[in-house]
Image: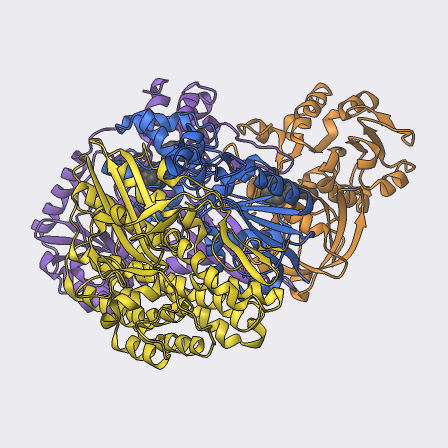
Chain colours: A orange, B blue, C purple, D yellow
Amino acid sequence: MTASKNQHLAANPYRPWPTRITSIVDLTENEKLFELRIIDDEVRDTFRFDSGQFVEMSIFGVGEAPISISSAPSKRGFIELCVRKAGDVTGALHSKRCGDIIGIRGPFGRGFPIQEMKGHDVLLVAGGLGIAPLKSLINQIHDERHEFGKVTILYGARNPSEVLFRYQFDMWKHRDDFELILTVDEADDSWADEVGVVTKLFDKIEIDSARTYSAICGPPVMYRFVIDEMRKKGMDVDRIFVSFERRMKCGIGKCGHCGVGHQYTCIDGPVFSYWEAMNLQEAI
Amino acid sequence: MGARVVVLGLASDFGCQVQLTNIEDHLLDVLGLIDLSYWQLASSGHMPDEYDVALVEGAVTTDEHVELLRKVRETAAVVIAIGSCAVTGGIPALAGTGDLEGRYEAVYGEGTDVARGRTRPVAVTSVIEVDYIVPGCPIDTGEFLKVLSRVLGGLSDKPSEQPMCFACKTRENVCFFEKGEMCLGVVTRSGCHARCISLGRPCTGCRGIAPEANLGAARDVFEQHGFETARSLHAMNLYNTNEEVAL
Amino acid sequence: MFFRVMDQSRLPDLVRGLAEEFEVVGPVAKDDRYVFGRIEDPADLELHYDTTLLPPKKLFFPPEERMMRFRVADNEVVDDEVYAGPRVLFGVHPCDINGLLLMDNVFMGDFEDPYYKARRENTVIVGVSCTPTDTCFCNAWGTDEVHWGFDIFLTDLGDRYFVSVRSVLGAELLDRHVETREIGDADTEAFQSASRKFKGSFTEELDTSQLPLLLDAKFDSPMWDELGDRCLSCGACSTVCPTCYCFDVVDRLEPDQKTGMRERRWDSCQFVEFAAVAHGENFRVSRASRVKYRYYHKQWGYLSKFERVLCVGCGRCERACLAKISPREVVKALETGGVQ
Amino acid sequence: MPLLTVEHVARIEGHGTITVDVHDGEVRDISMDVVEPARFFESIVVGRRFDEAPLITSRICGICSPNHALTSIKAMEAALGVDVSERTRVMRKLLVYGSYLQNHATHLYLFAAPDFVGLPSVFPLVETHPEVVERALRIKKLGNDLTTLVGGRPVHPITAVVGGFTSEPDPHVLEGFAETLRELAEDLTETVGLFSTFEVPDFSTSGDMLALSSEDDYAIYEGDVVAVDGGWRKPVSAYRDFIREQVLTHSNAKHSMVDGRTFMVGALPRVNASSDSLTQQAKDALRNAGVSAVSRNTFHNNMCQAVELVDAAGRCAGYIDQLLEMGGSTAPVSVAVRAGEGAGATEAPRGTLYHSYRVDDDGIITAGDVITPTAQNLANLEADMRVFAPTVVGLPRDEFLLSLEQLVRAYDPCLSCAVH
Ligand SMILES: Cc1cc2nc3c(=O)[nH]c(=O)nc-3n(C[C@H](O)[C@H](O)[C@H](O)COP(=O)(O)OP(=O)(O)OC[C@H]3O[C@@H](n4cnc5c(N)ncnc54)[C@H](O)[C@@H]3O)c2cc1C
Ligand code: SF4
Ligand code: SF4
Ligand code: SF4
């Protein structure tokens, strides 16, 4: 149980810990990557998480927003959040500067089943901001590359200016231990990669469905189509993993907002296997 | 220096402006945060050409009001409508139902020309777009402070969208319908802590119809409790003539 | 558990005695209904009440509550102490005690809620037996009986109470403040016959078999649209429910904008913004989907975790709902396939 | 031709403009135009239910809303033949005094005082005289608290309805409030002290003075109307006979006359009419301030308001003691709806306020009439300006206009009331 790993949550799990912003990278017009360092030494040193988990990012006077951790669990001492400006809290975060103090509490939720995935091929499909939680997984796989078989990453964005982490992906494109395909709905002159929705990329990849685990994260409309493609390739429903976004106020299974079917996204998810998701009403 | 704020009153009873002065405990704090540039009620001086935030009270009843509002909208970065008159038209808008000319004669007698340039009274929100609303007749000072703090912090307006019963229940009131009286809480925008109801008076709808109210279902509730639709509409019209309220 | 017998004429002694050590809260009259309120004088206590307007949850999880005070400049918590004085909650019906046990699962399970927990641990519960009214249906869920979750429970035997003592503290308090005697066979018999009478006085037996299954099977039934058309989206049902625990969290700044507090307040799944997320997405826009979700969560979501239904059959929502939407109607509609 | 105007006179409630026509140092004409737009209250109440009248007409004025609500309630009770309990009457008097404390404090400190210290508003005093501003806020809050205690909120009382009150304050809180009133008595006396240091012009109004008056109390909630000069006493129900209203072309507010004369209502006329009934502390305060109880100087209206504050504190504490002892109920008495007609009056902070209504068999209002204090005062105010302006016309333009504004503010006019 993650909760017991993180002692600092025992006293008051609603209490955000002061956290310093140590770096801010503008990714696109509306998205920034924040690198954070929890100020309290003890809390920082005991902070452990799995890819796919999230934190509640807190700005007092404005509120909280659940945000997936983008950095890999192996990166110690710092965590990264990739945040789109979507409203009050995320807007307030965007107006912060390096050195400013915000709050975080967490990590919360159930992440990707990394132990299960080890020893298998991995297919990761991201749409838009969905790359944020997958980024953590990608980085973890990168750090422990030898533990995994073939790794395929499909990533679609609306247009070239909305492609996140491009600098990193551009570097990876030349590596032969990752198959990375980028696509945009609408290309411009600068775009040399694929054009079209992410599902179209399935024609271009080979997967051995019997030994592949996959993870999907993106806007709600994307899931059904991507899963259809995966099913066509013969993948099992319990080896496909999806990550959900629901409204949350607590992150710890109390406030009730994130109900999806008979489960709560915050404690039962946000990562669910497709088999689980199929059994959740109104999930996909 | 804080945001430059002007306070403007159109056709109203000044009750909401009075409520602004009723923040006694915090008045000095608030004044420390803003640069109060114009407020006829409290200070001599002229309306400046530039300002950041305009608080507008009152309904729009004359051509000058309309003109003033257009100018305010062009000048101010933030416009806050305060009080029912500005938000829904409130009581002044009652005069807009029926024969306005007739009302004029009823009050002043025939053939006099006193109120120049008058128009059918409407809410500020139907003349210009506003950024924040503080509904209520009068506004609640606590709610005003909350909105002001959102304005100063650059946060979005988040007025309640729901009817009153939820808040009413948290105050443990016995529902007026149980006592055979009509209450407009079922359709009225909450946010006032169901103050009237908790003091023994049914809700009269001063905060306007809740955007999420289910008017069709409310009509059935009224009828089941013996209140004909005409009667409930009449009651709902007290503060809401400005919107086309259909039950 | 052990048992004692107490004459009803002794009740004021007990209340007064408890009031020496604790704040005593119990059912008091409000208009022609009842609320849990402060007991200053044993005479204020109305033990023959039907149901209170709000359930006891308000005492553990208040409608609005400060979670912490903060300072804006450095985003620092200044104070997150929970202030919970010792208190006796006197005269709670079995349904409401069961309601608290269901809330405990949520607030005192993983990630303990310090606010709820502090109040819960500082409150002594004295239960009292009741008489079912025509809106009660606790018999449908077995929440008409209560076996734990109280310190003392008083079963009304007319001239005396059959006293069940569950906790050490309960035993000590009883011992300290009131004269009781050992139970005799006549008392036990009277107790059993009171229980039988109680069980026999429910107006209806609800068929609740296969509820979770039916909820899934009839997920797309038009019955939900009919209920949705009637629902006022007022949230009264969740407010008065002893087992609804959803909340919203908001930050409030002091007028000087330098400090403030983070508060939580009761929320309701019947509100449209309840499931709205960024970029205009909303997972439950229609009223029908929201009414459905309330029952889906209560009768299946919660059950899937805690093996109990999240309803104790107190009938409060049925009384509070001006559209007369009620679990009984929903259960019947699920069983028979249509709304009346 | 130098036509001088002060548009939207500041620090009064409502929008009004002073226009003076000065030729060769001579004042030719002068008028106070009320540009506050009409909201047609007398017309919009028609067709509404009898119990909605207090709620609607309370919205005539957010400053003295308790008075509008109560006056409307009294008129409606007269129309429907409703008698209320003694307890209700005492509670209502407290509500009127809530309005006095709020209004007099606001007018004296926020509106009038800046004139005497040469400031545009009270806000600069925050820096220079914080103790004065704090005192002002304390008194105002006292009024707000009293109005809230009895009426449910500071503006537009909730609990006062035809027949009684829908809710009563907790006795413990009432008791505590009486305590607070006694503690703050000092503030009120100091207010009189402060205003007695301000010099006012030597001036005498030409109009009559009208106020309610009753045998056994300083009349603010009930009584007959007396004319101080006219020497008569008439029942409120006859108000439409003795007050003549006329419609003007330059102003949205009507003017009023009695016996063919202009007249004044407000604190000064009240003190003139009922000085014997003031509490001892108030009588002392009046004497110490050097104002005669038969002053005709309009500018003394402010001082009389301050004296009324002193009076209010003692009187309200007494009313609260009475409430705590007396028993009885304020729960609204049941109203048998019937056709009828009735009038009511109370003394609002700015003077006598009249409402009257006619209702039909179903309790639907068929006619309504409201005459507010400011509407009664306007003719007298213009008459005063005509006399006063020539005495100050020699001053520099700004000072001249400020003097006129000062005269206007002495009346503490409420223009949205005046027009309604
Ligand atoms: C598990 C999880 C992981 C997420 N990860 C990321 C991430 O890595 N990067 C990122 O940019 N965003 C992420 N989000 C989305 C992010 O939480 C929302 O964009 C954010 O809460 C909006 O808050 P706000 O205050 O800025 O907007 P608000 O001003 O509150 O509202 C803007 C919109 O967001 C909706 N909203 C409000 N609160 C929430 C909430 N708690 N959850 C969802 N929607 C809400 C409102 O209904 C409104 O439509 C994640 C959400 C979840 C549930
Ligand atoms: S109808 Fe009125 S009294 Fe009844 S619950 Fe709703 S707000 Fe309360
Ligand atoms: S079910 Fe009834 S109580 Fe609940 S929100 Fe709908 S109308 Fe209100
Ligand atoms: S759902 Fe209704 S009956 Fe069940 S516990 Fe809640 S309020 Fe009581």
Q: Is residue D254 left or right of residue D85?
A: right
Q: Position of residue A188 (x, y in %)?
A: 88, 29
Q: Is residue D39 visible?
A: yes
The one of B52 and D106 positioned closer to us in this rendering: D106
Q: Is residue A104 visible?
A: no
Does A192 appear above or below D232?
above
Q: Is residue B180 left or right of residue B143?
A: left
Does B64 appear above or below A78?
above
The one of D166 and D140 positioned closer to us in this rendering: D140
Numbered-mark total: 0
Q: Position of residue B93 (x, y in %)?
A: 45, 36
The one of B181 and D204 positioned closer to us in this rendering: D204
The one of D140 and C234 positioned closer to us in this rendering: D140
Q: Position of residue C70 (x, y in %)?
A: 57, 63
Q: Is residue D384 left or right of residue D127?
A: left
Which of the 4 image quarters holds residue D336? top left
Rendered-image quarter of ligand 1: top right
Q: Is residue A201 left or right of residue D402?
A: right
What residue is at 27 percent from the left and 59 percent from the top? Answer: D169
